Image: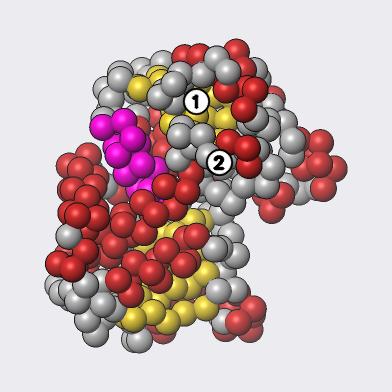
Amino acid sequence: MKSIIDILDFTVEELDELIATALDIIDNPNKYAHICDGKKLATLFFEPSTRTRLSFEAAMYELGGNVLGFSEANSSSAAKGESIADTAKTVSCYADIIAMRHPKEGAAFVAANNASIPVINAGDGGHCHPTQTLADLLTIRREKGRFNNLTVGLCGDLKFGRTVHSLINALSRYSNIKFVLISPEELKLPSYVKKDILQKNNIPYEQTTDLEAAMPKLDILYMTRVQRERFFNEEDYLRLKDSYILTPDKLKNAKSDLSILHPLPRVNEISVAIDNDPRACYFKQVLNGKYMRMALILKLLKEAGTI
């Protein structure tokens, strides 16, 4: 039985298959409207979420299934000290598939090792966020028509940004990808990501603190927020939180077909004045996330022999 903890759990062929399914769902929604009738998704969210949790729920409902779960740790037995392993074993008695978000790295792995149903990692601390990456990939595919021959700028919190780590992992398997890593010194991409992914696979990258200087070469700009919840002290967060704010003026030298992505929520790192720019893709990402989660639920339930 397969669970999804990391984007690298997918082969490139499996990613292509998921994207093909998502595109078919977009074109033929009625074909999928009852495929999960009688099936239940458990959403175990030990950490706050809007898009990820609601898009998983919307995905299951649109497949004809049902949803149960909780949206904060305090409303679960975790507040009484129950282990992740025991929670996973318990929920396996009630549902057909689990989507779990947790603030601790590795929590989804523990859940998957103890559940008797598929587990989807909906974000584990600063580790990774594979279903956000699926949303990102579908957005790139629909906007650019390809995954190769792209220069991708990643801007903001590259140290704690699990969405950034997952996206680098995914795109690194395609040809002629270049990364421009734009961040304050304190929030640079971790050395292990550079060593284990970029350097190991001979993928060209550059690091800079200057967003405007990098802008003209970018095909994709992936903005991230500086995440208050990942900081150990408020002083560091307040000092760094406004490091990069994307405004119309900063786009004056950008390509006309630049795609601007953001995993959301944004705080103030993208001006609302950009929302109506045709290059803004972050709300398209939200919708694409629902389609990819539908495709993923289908794939895992089929592999488990449940549908």
Comes first in the chain, label 1 or label 2: 1
Q: Can residue 114 be seen in this view?
A: no
Residue at point 49%, 25% (across, down): 153
Residue at point 47%, 14% (across, down): 217
Q: In this view, does 203 lie to the left or right of 239?
A: left
Q: In this view, does 199 lie to the left or right of 78?
A: left
Which segment did they paint magenta? 132-145
Element under disc 1: strand
Amino acid type, label 1 = Gly
Which percent across, then down, holds residue 266? 62, 47
The residue carrying pointer 2 sits among few (fewer than 14), some (14 to 19) or many (20 or more) residues within 10 Å by Cα, namely some
Magenta stretch: dominant secondary structure: helix
Q: Is residue 307 visible?
A: yes
Amino acid type, label 2 = Asp
**Front position in the image: 143 or 236:** 143
Q: What residue is shown with label 2?
A: 275
The residue carrying pointer 1 sits among few (fewer than 14), some (14 to 19) or many (20 or more) residues within 10 Å by Cα, namely many
Q: Which mark is residue 153?
A: 1
